[in-house]
Amino acid sequence: MRPTVPPEPKTAHDQPVRLTPEPPPGRPPGPGQAALLAAAITVVVLCAADAVARSYPFGSRTRNVSDLGNQYVPFHAHLWDLLHGRGTGGLLVNWQSGYGAGFLPDLGTYLTSPFAPLVAVFPRDEIDLAVYVITVLKIACAAAAMTWLLLRLRPGPWWAAGLLGASYALCGWTVATASYNLMWLDGLIALPLLCLVGEWILNGRRPLLGVLVVTAAWIANFYTAYMATLAAALVFLLRLCLADLPARRRAIAAGRAVLTFALGIGLAAPLVTVVYFGSAHASEGRFTRFARVGTEDLLARLLPTTYSFGSPALFVGTTALLLALALPFHRAVPRRVRAGWSLLVVLVTLSMQWGPTHLLWHAFAAPQGSSYRQTFVVCALLVIAAWHSLSYGRPDRRALGAAAGLLALVAVVASGSPLVRSFAWPVFLTAVLGALLGLLLLGRRRPLLRMAPAALAAVLLIGTQVGEATATSAVATRMRLGRMDDYALWGDRQQDQADAIARADGWPRYRTDPGREQTVGNDPLEVGGQGAQYYSSHTSAVFSTTLTALGYGWTSGGRSVQSLDNAVTDAIFSVGARVHSPPDPHQNWFPQDGSRVTVTREAVPPLVTVRPSAATGAFGPSPYRNQELLLGARVYTVPRVTVLNGAGKRADRSTDQRQGVRVGGKATITARCPAGSEVYLWAPHFAGTARLAGPAAHGPTGRFRADWPVTKIAAMEPLGTVPASGRLAIELAPKGMGVVPDRAVGCLDTGRLRSAVRHLRATGATEVTVSGSGGTVHAELPAGSKGVAVVAAPRIAGWRCASGDATAVPAKQYHGLIAVPLDGRSTSVTCSFHPPGLRLGTTIGAAALTSLVGLGTFSAVRRRRDTGHPR
């Protein structure tokens, strides 16, 4: 037996420096208290920052910028309606948007967070407050989760863990990018939780809970969960390499990790596969090409109060950054630990700057919009590195000096970036001073100002973090509002629209469209009705291309389709009531006209009509002829037009892909049409206003929004009635250079349209019903109906139809709409929607569940056997 050697007595200089105040008698603070501290710091900072920025709900400025106002708030409003039994449609089909869109992909992308159902406890007209509260709660939970992880990785001062947990949750990525993309915040929570799963695997604990945590993360938001899973895998591999384990145990732990994550993702497969196939069938949208940011901009984003849309927001607070920079020089930390965590931070940061690995972080799909969505991974690694630097004892003056030198170098290089504005330097220098003083105080043994050094240091470091994080968040909020499109909070305009729609609603006998004068890109979800408007990552390509061919407008590269105020398309899509509102006063695109919310009604065909034969021909370049093709009747006169510039000369031809003539200043379109017909102008690549000219002219002003290169195109606009002379002149007031196509004008014969509508009503369905889930449409038809039944809904993937009692088969297509062949004997048609990918996902999920139950049973039997037969 090896003799026991008594330890040498320690001198005063060998005593460890206490990093936390002497705990009071009783139970010492633990992970729970630290997590609460982190959450409290986070909530205080977020609310204080919004108060400083005078942003909702602490000020008059809206926080609904970009997709928050256009997508996420309306989707949460729709969830509120579904939870209260008031929505049109259900989990399978959303009949309010896009004339009928699959809902499960949107649900899995935007609304499967466990926080999302909290909207139900708020009043409907406080949906903006509900989304804000959910956002703050998510960020606070991310702070608590990271704090818990840090204390599981290594023991250390509880208040410091809380401080660093808040640093992670309040990182630049959160306040600059994710705070208005609130579904990404589930990934912010998932990353530390998945790393905790890795710790359980290393210690052989909680196998079932680990699988369920992985499942919950992937269900909440699979996009950021994918990034968080990659990050957790890197952390797990590093922890495995640093652990003193034999090779066999390392292999077993790695196998358990693979099995845990495979089972967890497998259980989430029913939703994940639906989201995947929803994206596969979506419109291409507008994607940004990867471009590496310069070193100056990259380092600038480490500093407080810097902001930009196209660079990675790496800010984690000066204290955390100093500690992370000190780690390589901290001699109390084992060399392998120093090297491992420092190298991991550097490599992951560099991976954001190289095209192939950048694409890997985004699941091999180039992101639309902000490029550096994986930045929260680097922020997490910086915070974990900082914790390792502190938990081994406060870095000595040598290490802090080296870290301060590196930070000074970062500041010098970053000073060349335009992202570092003048107000950043006072905040940064104050934060550096506070962080250095706080860390130096941790090394003192004697009280200062009659306070324990650790307590004074904690106050100073937490105060520094609160101050710089508040400033950074407030700056991001203000600059976002100045650089992005923003949208009004719920107010009188939306309430008036919702009330008008509720009074006019007649679904499914006819649709009620919220109107061309939209407030946000998803008006039907926010104010009700059943319209064309739809903005989602899953806007189907068939829907977008069909409506584009009919003269509809869109933004976001085709993923945000707008409504169209047109009598023909209203007849095609059974829009029997249409809301007309003044232009949104929150937007300054066009002058206000002072009108009020009104509703017009028209007799339209039912949702299901009967056509004499299957679709023939294809859409051409003219939306007027394409509308006639779908309607089944000739109703437009499409005259030749002449476009004259302000000098009275013919305008020049376009020299790019846009076909037509160029207009950059005031111009006039002249044409001849039958007197009394309705005038429409189709100019998808024109931005500005248009109106009929002349003493006898009267009608609305058409408002057009388009750009080049194309991210948005303008919708067709009604301009009034052709005068008795048959000669019409349209005055154009462009906003920039635009293009007017050669066949821009269409004159609608309303008499012919009424005759076509009467025929479709007489031969169409006598009764149409839609199931509560929205996934089944049933129509009763007149006896002897032949040809093809057409459902006024886009033929998106997943529809299966049958006539009479026949077996359902994949639906046919009638110029982009759902079609069912008729044999003359059946008097009904039924169409059911089966979300693409659901069957595959259910099969994978069932296999994962069976495997999990089998493994659990096997483990329980083995434990019972081992207990009954001890060695």
Image (cartoon, rainbow, N blue to C red):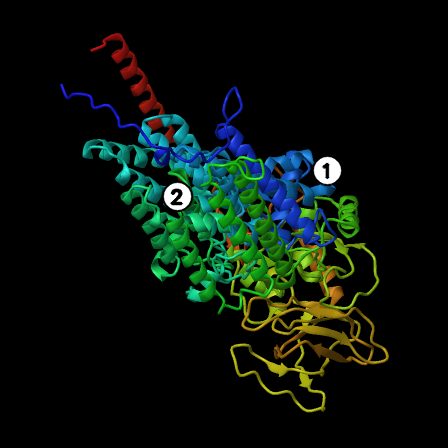
User: Residue 48, how many percent across, how many down?
Assistant: 66, 47
Give the Cα separation between the discs numbered 2 and 1.
47 Å
In this rendering, would 870 be left or right of 736? left
Q: What count of labels does the image hold?
A: 2
Element assignment for label 2: helix
* 527 and 364: which is toward the camera: 364
Q: Which residue is mark 1?
A: 123
User: Residue 609, how many percent across, how many down?
Assistant: 63, 51
Quarter containing the N terminus? top left
**Amino acid at dot 2:** Ser
* 519 and 322: which is toward the camera: 322
Residue at 32 percent of width and 35 percent of height = 257
User: Residue 449, how many percent across, how many down?
Assistant: 58, 39
User: From this viewpoint, is residue 391 visible?
Assistant: yes
In this rendering, would 106 be left or right of 565? left
User: Residue 634, how many percent across, how many down?
Assistant: 65, 67
* 526 and 294: which is toward the camera: 294
Q: Which residue is mark 2?
A: 389
Quadrant in the picture for residue 47? top right
Q: Nearer the viewer, mark 2 or mark 1?
A: 2
Element assignment for label 1: loop
Residue at 60 percent of width and 46 percent of height = 784
